[in-house]
Image (cartoon, grey):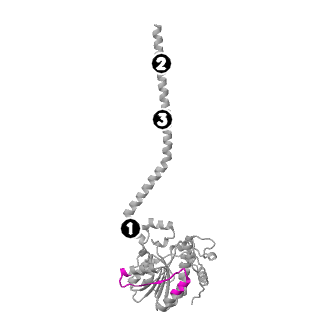
Amino acid sequence: MMGLVTERLGRLSRNNNLTFNNSLGFVCFLVNKLKQNQRLLARQSTNLPRTMLLVFIIAGLGAVTLLVVLFGPHIRNFAAGAVCKSPACLDGKTVLITGANTGIGKETARDLAIRGARVIMACRDVAKGEEAAASIRAAYSKAQVEVRELDLADTCSIRAFAQEFLRDVDRLHILINNAGVMMCPYTKTIDGFEMHIGVNHLGHFLLTSLLVGLMKRSAPARIVVVSSLAHNFGWVRFHDLHSQGSYNSGLAYCQSKLANVIFARELARRLKGTNVTVNSVHPGTVNSDLTRHSTLMTIFMTVFSMWLKTPREGAQTSIYCAVAEELHSVSGKHFSDCAPAFVAPQGRSEETARRLWDVSCELLGIEWH
């Protein structure tokens, strides 16, 4: 009897030990699982922001794509801006456009040639100018377009151009100061001027001074100065006009565009009563090769091309100021999208205008008559 009890107690003890061991193993299993889950959650929590960011980016691109597809035509119509609706005919008129071999200059030349004007395309690169002229003739067989060499970064070239022009041409009804450079690396013109202020302002200042007498004799006549919205961010740095102390290509461009606006307003004041009007224009943000010196701007133009004007659309305000009948006596104004536009306070300062005029004459060694 005692032996039987002992055997059963031993069996129970062994069973209890087995049960205990199984329970301990299960507990260890749960602990290990918990640790694994904690590590998994830690990894997931680390990857979660990246995953969410990727989801947001994909969703954003999808939304933009959808908007472009749905509203693309409306975006393009808005970006295109106003169109010059004037039916003005320019038969018998002579037009001079600087930088007419590409961009808005070329489109301006095309439009005015179709209106019957004799268009003289003043270009630094004559070969490209001839290509542009040929394309205009191909589009309109009766176009009177000719190309002449003009380098606005060289005052000798400007003087030689003007001398030849005055010898060959007896009338000048429209002068469009269109050529320009934008955000180029620090360089100087042949005469030692910083490139932006030298080409965009001083070059056109000299050219206009040499041809204004002919325009007075051809009156009514118009001068159109292509500036930019960028003039709002510019200041004329009289203490360092040529950026020798410090240089920023964007600020140098803004300064030159402000100089364009100031020049147009001051010239209009000085030509009052001569029947020669002067106005400046902002063509809009145009997708052209003007940004070739800036990789960042080139990428921007490529990515957002749908929101930008084409050269033909950008030319509309220049054309408007050159031909619109309602502007026959309007002078000293600034236009954008074929309508009067805001001029920054620094562009309206008469003191700055007179000072810039005097400094420009001194740098170029000229006197206006």
Q: Using the image, determine if residue 21 lies above or below residue 355.
A: above
- Location of residue 129 in the rendering, given as x and y in whole percent from the top left corner: 44, 80
> Left of 240 or right of it: where is 55?
left
Looking at this rendering, what residue extends furthest in the top direction?
A: 1
Amino acid, disc 3: Lys
Amino acid, disc 2: Arg
Residue at point 53% right, 84% down?
A: 157
Numbered disc 1: secondary structure: helix
- Location of residue 216 in the rendering, given as x and y in whole percent from the top left corner: 50, 90
- Location of residue 133 in the rendering, given as x and y in whole percent from the top left corner: 41, 81
First in sequence: mark 1 vs mark 3: 3
Q: Evaluate whether residue 17 shows in this view.
A: yes
> Left of 243 or right of it: where is 329?
left
Q: Say whether residue 268 is magenta.
A: no
Instruction: Please report the bounds of the magenta region as a residue range.
Output: 137-161
Residue at point 48% right, 28% down?
A: 25
Q: CA distance from mark 1 to mark 2?
A: 86 Å
Residues packed near mark 1 inside 10 Å, few (<14), some (14 to 19) or many (20 plus)? few
Label drawn at residue 74:
1
- Location of residue 269 in the rendering, given as x and y in whole percent from the top left corner: 54, 85
Q: Using the image, determine if residue 5 lies above or below residue 138.
A: above
Q: CA distance from mark 1 to mark 3?
A: 58 Å
Residues packed near mark 2 inside 10 Å, few (<14), some (14 to 19) or many (20 plus)? few
Label drawn at residue 341:
none
Image depth: mark 1 or mark 2 in front: 2
> Which residue matches tag 3?
33
Amino acid, disc 1: His
Residue at point 50% right, 46% down?
A: 46
Label drawn at residue 14:
2
Residues 201 and 334: in front is 201
The quarter in which the N terminus is drawn is top left
Q: CA distance from mark 2 to mark 3?
A: 28 Å
